[in-house]
């Protein structure tokens, strides 16, 4: 569809859609402003939306799409474009790409028919309004064009499992939203797929549980680094080679749920270290090509917060920004932003990660009444929650719009006292998670530098690890990982006034400007999104207090 004169001048309404691989999602960008973005799993209540198999690739994130339009009061006819984060014209047969995926052609067929599927879902949509955006361009745009550097341009590095035929992109965005790609590593070489293979070998769910491998790595020593260095190499031309690793020769395969041994932790540590080394070299090379000072990151690999901190320390960049929805969910937003930039819209940085559904006080109260559950409206919600936390209660915190991306950032969070070491095990039990998994702290932004070092500050999206200073180890044991690190969220009173006030009230009672923050869900389920989800989670878990909008529900009085 050729842009009309008005569209050349910008002011476009663009729906972004990610459907093909992981984490189906939708996003809406209007006049260069990110209005809404959400993953389908938050609506369907099926974690990750669907398994990333070719047979599921036809399915669209229907509920997320409908909600995005409703949120902005738009209908399909109002849209200037639908941006789809995969371009089937770039794909090649799987065997030609060296992939053992005999049904990949089905995925490509479904993608080619996406305009028809979308027009069927959205009556009134012209199929010609659908634009295919290359997968890694969508990832790149999701970070560079959503970042604080959008009006100046930035370097961009994307690493994931795979797109159409690549697993990597290194480039630079200029101040007009135009991307120059310096290098794109072709499949089958893929750091993301290699990490997924290891995830499966360790008994975890591939394309889902990679963060568990990162957590396990903290318990190991990288004694297999020589073997990994031999198999994962830089090409010297800006790319890398990943040869098949015989994982069994290094540590036996684990069945799901089986106990891991030191060999498994050492293997995880070795792959993690090699990943960090390769990422640092890729970033250093990019910087030497551009002379840039700001780097933006996306792709599933960019959710590896240990590697991100290594990049901050060793890449030479002044500043690094990571898209909070760095996995495929973010490509819905990136595809929409790229089409907006191409159409001449002036883009503004995304306003934060709270881009999902929100609820009015009336809607929340109606949900409480429907559930016939006892609730109250305290005069000071922040103080009430702080009091419960200080008394070692567990609090479910449901406030504002839900987060886009995998991290709970104080909108759909489970909170606890960080000073009690037993709270790590307690929260992992509440959530039904493995005991080696750490829980993370949120901290008042102005106090973060007193407690944490090494990683970048502020860190509002939990995408970097920091070292806990020695004197604070004993004060906040629940959030200090076995290696002395913590994946922090800094809370700024301007951006998050209620959350910041709750932290201040907690500090007034305990001397600690830190609380434990983990996602509000139980194992295997998506994060809570609606008031009903919150009540279901509260009703089935030993949570002491649910703070939902201006209301609180106490376990002691809820069911009497
Ligand atoms: Fe991806």
Image (spheres, rainbow, N blue to C red):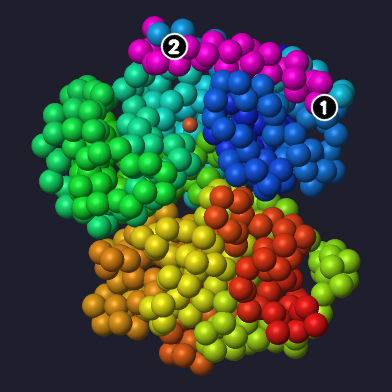
Pick whichever, 385 or 201, lies toward us: 201
User: Is any atom of residue 302 visible in this view?
Assistant: no
CA neighbours of label 1 inside 10 A, class few (<14), some (14 to 19), many (20+): some
What residue appears at the point 41 percent right and 33 percent down from the top-left corner? 160
Q: Is 341 colored magenta in this rendering?
A: no
Pick whichever, 207 or 5, lies toward us: 207
Pick whichever, 230 or 246, lies toward us: 246
Element type where label 1 sits in the image = loop
Q: Which image quadrant for residue 476?
A: bottom left
User: Is any atom of residue 553 visible in this view?
Assistant: yes
Element type where label 2 sits in the image = helix
Q: Position of residue 557 (x, y in %)?
A: 75, 84
Query: In which quadrant of the rendered image does the N terminus lie?
Result: top right
Whether 327 is drawn above or below 485: the answer is above
Q: Circle 2 is placed at which residue position?
A: 94
Which label is found at residue 122? 1
Left or right for 210, reference 278: right
What residue appears at the point 42 percent right and 54 percent down from the top-left corner? 463
Left or right for 273, reference 2: left
Sequence order check, earlier mark of 2 and 1:
2
Q: Is 115 colored magenta in this rendering?
A: yes
Q: Which residues are magenta?
A: 96-121
Q: Which image quadrant for residue 74?
A: top right
Left or right for 79, reference 154: right
Q: Position of residue 454 (x, y in %)?
A: 27, 64
Front of the two marks 2 and 1? 2
Pick whichever, 433 or 109, lies toward us: 433
């Amino acid at each position: 569809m050729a842009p009309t004169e008005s569209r050349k001048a910008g002011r476009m309404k663009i729906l972004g859609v990610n459907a093909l691989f992981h984490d189906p999602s939708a996003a809406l960008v209007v006049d260069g402003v990110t209005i809404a973005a959400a993953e389908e799993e938050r609506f369907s209540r099926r974690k990750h939306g669907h398994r990333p198999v070719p047979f599921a690739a036809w399915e669209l994130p229907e509920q997320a799409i409908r909600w995005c339009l409703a949120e902005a009061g738009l209908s399909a006819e109002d849209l200037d474009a639908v941006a789809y984060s995969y371009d089937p014209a770039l794909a090649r047969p799987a065997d030609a790409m060296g992939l053992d995926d005999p049904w990949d052609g089905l995925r490509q067929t479904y993608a080619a028919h996406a305009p028809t599927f979308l027009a069927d879902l959205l009556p009134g949509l012209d199929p010609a309004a659908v634009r295919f955006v290359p997968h890694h361009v969508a990832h790149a745009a999701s970070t560079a064009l959503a970042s604080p550097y959008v009006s100046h341009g930035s370097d961009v590095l994307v690493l994931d499992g795979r797109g159409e035929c690549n697993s990597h992109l290194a480039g630079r965005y200029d101040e007009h939203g135009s991307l120059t790609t310096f290098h794109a590593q072709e499949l089958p070489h893929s750091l993301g797929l290699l990490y997924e293979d290891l995830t499966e070998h360790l008994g975890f769910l591939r394309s889902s549980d990679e963060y568990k491998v990162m957590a396990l790595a903290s318990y190991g020593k990288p004694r297999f680094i020589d073997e990994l260095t031999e198999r994962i190499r830089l090409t010297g031309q800006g790319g890398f080679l990943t040869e098949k690793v015989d994982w069994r020769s290094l540590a036996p395969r684990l069945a799901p749920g089986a106990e891991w041994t030191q060999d498994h932790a050492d293997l995880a540590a070795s792959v993690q270290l090699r990943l960090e080394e390769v990422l640092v070299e890729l970033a250093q090379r990019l910087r030497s090509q551009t002379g840039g000072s700001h780097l933006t990151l996306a792709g599933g690999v960019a959710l590896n917060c240990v590697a991100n901190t290594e990049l901050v320390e060793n890449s030479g960049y002044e500043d690094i920004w990571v898209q909070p929805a760095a996995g495929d969910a973010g490509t819905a937003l990136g595809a929409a932003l790229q089409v907006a930039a191409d159409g001449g819209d002036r883009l503004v940085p995304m306003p934060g990660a709270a881009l999902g559904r929100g609820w009015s006080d009336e809607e929340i109260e109606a949900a409480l009444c429907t559930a016939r559950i006892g609730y109250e409206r305290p005069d000071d919600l922040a103080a009430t929650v702080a009091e419960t936390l200080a008394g070692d209660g567990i609090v479910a915190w449901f406030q504002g719009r839900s987060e886009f991306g995998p991290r709970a950032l104080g909108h759909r969070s489970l909170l606890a006292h960080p000073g009690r070491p037993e709270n790590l095990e307690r929260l992992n039990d509440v959530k039904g998670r493995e005991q080696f998994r750490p829980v993370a702290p949120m901290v008042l932004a102005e106090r973060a530098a007193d407690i944490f070092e090494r990683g970048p500050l502020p860190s509002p999206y939990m995408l970097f690890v920091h070292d806990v200073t020695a004197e604070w180890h004993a004060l906040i044991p629940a959030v200090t990982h076995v290696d002395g690190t913590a994946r922090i969220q800094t809370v700024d009173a301007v951006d998050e006034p209620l959350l910041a006030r709750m932290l201040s009230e907690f500090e007034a009672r305990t001397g600690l400007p830190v609380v434990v923050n983990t996602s509000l869900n139980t194992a295997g389920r998506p994060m809570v999104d609606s008031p009903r989800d919150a009540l279901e989670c509260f009703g089935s878990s030993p949570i002491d207090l649910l703070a939902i909008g201006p209301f609180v529900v106490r376990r002691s009085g809820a069911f009497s």
